[in-house]
């Protein structure tokens, strides 16, 4: 008979780790939001439904960080869908796409003048527009039909997200009042706090660094025709989070996450190929599971290394199911590492000029 005390200690340690790593209320909301998306994908096989689910998770995450508001949700969704169209149209023209990326990166940093929550809103908007806009052009040319098809699925992003927000608002009596206070302060209707002026000044400096980092990364991607360049562009923007210590920490977290995630994805694919080769190429169940895990890591995981590693692992597994091979693991790792080095190097140069880099 097995001793119960060591088993109980292991069980307690595992439960504590999961509680510290995931917000289970958010997991429930993400699963509820993704359920219609996954049902549509499993029944139709249309990958645009998964893109709509990805958009919904970004909208929910941004809305939760900027105080729940249905008006803000609709405004953010409209801005993202319009930005996706703009990126899709600009992508074939490097001279237009590169400064567009730089402008969006700078705008996301500049929104930090109203606090980290508003910068998160800008980051999620830039992330969705960049990834979806590049994906629509993955086959070359301006894919207007693909954009219109994505637009037809946008209800899958808006309706479930709105319902989840209504659920959360109904559980919080202070939700409407807090949203009103944020709106009033945004329009200078409330007295400014002492830290607001300094935060606005440092956010302006952050916009400069992000603009330079994204400009360089986007130029490398478009003029050297690097594959999966959106990973490099976003990594260059993502690591510019504050002073040099915080940039090193963020770049290090992303490096560790992508290395263990890509390695785990390759291992998982190898094991699956040895045990059941047909599993990687049959049906839509595996892409649906990968999408759900990615959504949970994006909106619910409280450890960044774990979240980014899970996303990298799911990316490798999805590539294997789509016939691209596990070489995507090397490509993703290289893009993330190079993008992180670009952001860190430009932050260091900016600090050496005596400028302030914000802790956003």
Image (cartoon, grey):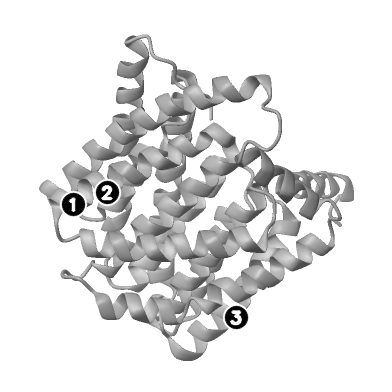
Tell me the CA gap for discs 3 and 2: 33 Å
Question: Which label belongs to residue 96?
Answer: 1
**How many residues crowd around disc 2 within 10 Å: few (fewer than 14), some, or many (20 or more)?**
many
Q: Seen from this angle, which residue lies furthest bottom?
A: 43
Question: Which label belongs to residue 36?
Answer: 3
Q: Earlier in the sequence, mark 1 or mark 3?
A: 3
Query: Which sits in the foreground, 308 or 148?
Result: 148
Is the Cβ of the residue at disc 1 closer than 8 Å to that at disc 2? Answer: yes
x then y, percent, for residue 203 = 47, 28
x then y, percent, for residue 311 = 47, 54
Tell me the CA gap for discs 1 and 3: 36 Å
Is the N terminus in the top left, top right, bottom left or bottom right quadrant? bottom right
Q: Earlier in the sequence, mark 3 or mark 2?
A: 3
x then y, percent, for residue 326 = 31, 60
**Of the two numbered discs 3 and 2 in the rendering, the one whose residue sits closer to the viewer:** 2
Decide: is 108 above or below 4.
above
x then y, percent, for residue 330 = 28, 49
| Residue at image location 55% in from the left, 66% down from the top | 56
Query: Which sits in the foreground, 52 or 211?
Result: 211
Secondary-structure class at tag 1: helix
Which residue matches tag 2?
100
| Residue at image location 56% in from the left, 67% down from the top | 292
Secondary-structure class at tag 2: helix
């Amino acid at each position: 008979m097995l001793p119960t005390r060591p088993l109980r200690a292991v069980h307690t340690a595992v439960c504590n780790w999961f509680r510290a790593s995931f917000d289970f209320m958010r997991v429930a909301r993400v699963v509820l939001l993704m359920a219609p998306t996954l049902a549509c994908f499993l029944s139709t096989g249309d990958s645009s439904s998964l893109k709509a689910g990805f958009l919904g998770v970004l909208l929910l995450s941004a809305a939760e960080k900027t105080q729940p508001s249905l008006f803000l949700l609709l405004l953010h969704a409209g801005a993202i869908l319009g930005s996706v169209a703009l990126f899709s149209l600009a992508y074939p023209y490097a001279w237009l796409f590169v400064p567009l990326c730089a402008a969006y990166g700078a705008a996301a940093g500049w929104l930090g003048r109203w606090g980290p929550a508003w910068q998160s809103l800008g980051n999620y908007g830039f992330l969705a527009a960049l990834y979806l806009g590049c994906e629509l052009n993955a086959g070359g040319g301006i894919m207007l039909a693909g954009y219109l098809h994505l637009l037809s699925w946008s209800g899958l992003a808006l309706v479930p997200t709105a319902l989840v927000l209504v659920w959360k608002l109904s559980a919080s009596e202070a939700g409407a009042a807090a949203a009103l206070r944020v709106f009033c302060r945004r329009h200078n209707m409330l007295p400014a706090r002492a830290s607001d002026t300094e935060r606005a000044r440092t956010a302006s400096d952050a916009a400069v660094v992000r603009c330079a980092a994204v400009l360089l990364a986007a130029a490398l991607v478009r003029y050297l025709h690097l594959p999966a360049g959106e990973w490099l562009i976003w990594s260059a923007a993502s690591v510019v989070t504050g002073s040099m210590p915080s940039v090193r920490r963020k770049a290090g977290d992303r490096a560790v996450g992508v290395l263990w995630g890509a390695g785990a994805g390759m291992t998982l694919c190898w094991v699956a190929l040895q045990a059941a080769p047909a599993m990687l190429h049959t049906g839509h169940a595996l892409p649906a599971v990968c999408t759900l895990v990615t959504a949970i890591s994006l909106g619910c995981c409280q450890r960044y290394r774990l979240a980014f590693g899970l996303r990298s692992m799911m990316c490798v597994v999805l590539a294997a199911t789509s016939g691209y091979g596990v070489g995507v693991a090397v490509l993703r790792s290289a893009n993330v590492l190079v993008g992180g080095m670009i952001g860190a190097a430009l932050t260091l140069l900016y600090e050496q000029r005596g400028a302030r880099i914000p802790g956003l």
